[in-house]
Each structure stands twice: as structure tokens, then as C-alpha cells.
């Protein structure tokens, strides 16, 4: 069983930066696709970005392109989300999710393992 735990959330001002971490345990996930999603109250969880099992394939939703960067450190069994130029509309709970296949998918149903989420709040 894979367990993923997010960390790194917090409160930042507009234009600030945060780096989220998604640490996996229970199994090596170097060949797994890993995604980041976010959710605000009363809205569906939305896809943000994902990295494929090889690390060479990455996909971002349009609203974060040029500001967010996903990466993985297989030696640490960890995936990161570097978030720069943050905006108030980035405020959400951010979730990490992993799937035991290498290819990226953008829907929540495609991921088997989810963390508990970490709150990101961007003040204006």
C-alpha cells in the first residue's frame, strides 16, 4: 500500500512562493505518475499538474503554466510542486495523488493513492 503525505502549505502574500512536497512511503513510486490537485469549498477538486513515471512528461493546467513547476526526486521518493507568483485564486487545499501507471491522467478517478491535503492561502 502506498501512502502519500503533503507538506509545505501556508499563508503567503500575492506574488510570493511556496514549495509543496509529496512524500511517499510503502512502495517506491519512481515509475508512478503523480499529480497535484486543488480544491476550494463547494467546488470539485481540480487538476493542477502531473508528472509521468519517467519524469520526462509533465502537464500543467493553463492557469498555472509559467508559475508552477512539478519535479520529482526518486532517491527521496518525493514529488515537489514549486509555486511562484502566487495569486489569491490559487488559494485552496492542495492534494498529491499517485497512480501505479506511468502515464498522466487529469481526472481524479485515475489516481489510486491520495494524501490528506495541505492548505495554501494567498492573501491579497
Image (cartoon, rainbow, N blue to C red):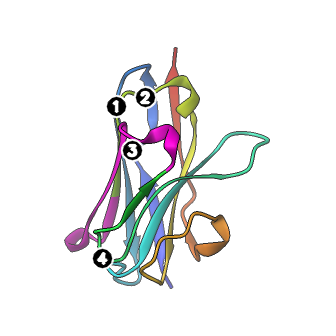
| Label 3 vs label 1, nearer the camera | 1
Q: Is residue 44 magenta?
A: no
Q: Residue at x 24, y 69 (%)?
A: 76
In the rendered view, tell whether residue 85 sits above or below residue 105: above
How many numbered marks appear?
Answer: 4
Earlier sequence position, callout 1 versus callout 4: 1
Cα–Cα gap, marks 4 and 2? 28 Å
Earlier sequence position, callout 2 versus callout 3: 3
Earlier sequence position, callout 2 versus callout 1: 1
The residue nearer to you, when weighing 68 against 123, is: 68
> Residue placed farthest to the right in the image?
42
Q: Quick one: SS at disc 4?
A: loop
Q: Quick one: SS at disc 2?
A: loop
| Residue position for label 2 | 86
Q: Which mark is residue 80?
A: none
| Residue position for label 4 | 54
Cα–Cα gap, marks 3 and 4? 24 Å
Earlier sequence position, callout 4 versus callout 2: 4
In the rendered view, tell whether residue 84 sits above or below residue 7: above
Cα–Cα gap, marks 1 and 4? 27 Å
| Horizontal side, residue 40 vs residue 88: left or right | right
| Residue position for label 3 | 8
Q: Which span of residues is magenta-colored? A: 61-79
| Residue position for label 1 | 17
Disc 2 to disc 1: CB gap under 8 Å: yes
Disc 3 residue crowd, few under 14, some 14–19, many 20+, Cα 10 Å: some
Disc 1 residue crowd, few under 14, some 14–19, many 20+, Cα 10 Å: some
The residue nearer to you, when weighing 6 against 69, is: 69
Q: Is residue 66 magenta?
A: yes
| Horizontal side, residue 95 vs residue 40: left or right | left
Earlier sequence position, callout 3 versus callout 1: 3
Residue 5 image position (x, y, % from top left): 46, 62
Amino acid at each position: 500500500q502506498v501512502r502519500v503525505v503533503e507538506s509545505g502549505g501556508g499563508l503567503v502574500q500575492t506574488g510570493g512562493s511556496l514549495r509543496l512536497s509529496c512524500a511517499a512511503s510503502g512502495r517506491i513510486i519512481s515509475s508512478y505518475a503523480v499529480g497535484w490537485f486543488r480544491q476550494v469549498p463547494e467546488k470539485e477538486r481540480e487538476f493542477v499538474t502531473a508528472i509521468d513515471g519517467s519524469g520526462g512528461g509533465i502537464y500543467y493546467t493553463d492557469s498555472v503554466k509559467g508559475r508552477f513547476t512539478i519535479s520529482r526526486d526518486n532517491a527521496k521518493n518525493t514529488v515537489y510542486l514549486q509555486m511562484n507568483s502566487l495569486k489569491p485564486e490559487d488559494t485552496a487545499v492542495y492534494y498529491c495523488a499517485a497512480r501505479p501507471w506511468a502515464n498522466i491522467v487529469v481526472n481524479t478517478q485515475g489516481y489510486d493513492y491520495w494524501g490528506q491535503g495541505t492548505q495554501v492561502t494567498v492573501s491579497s
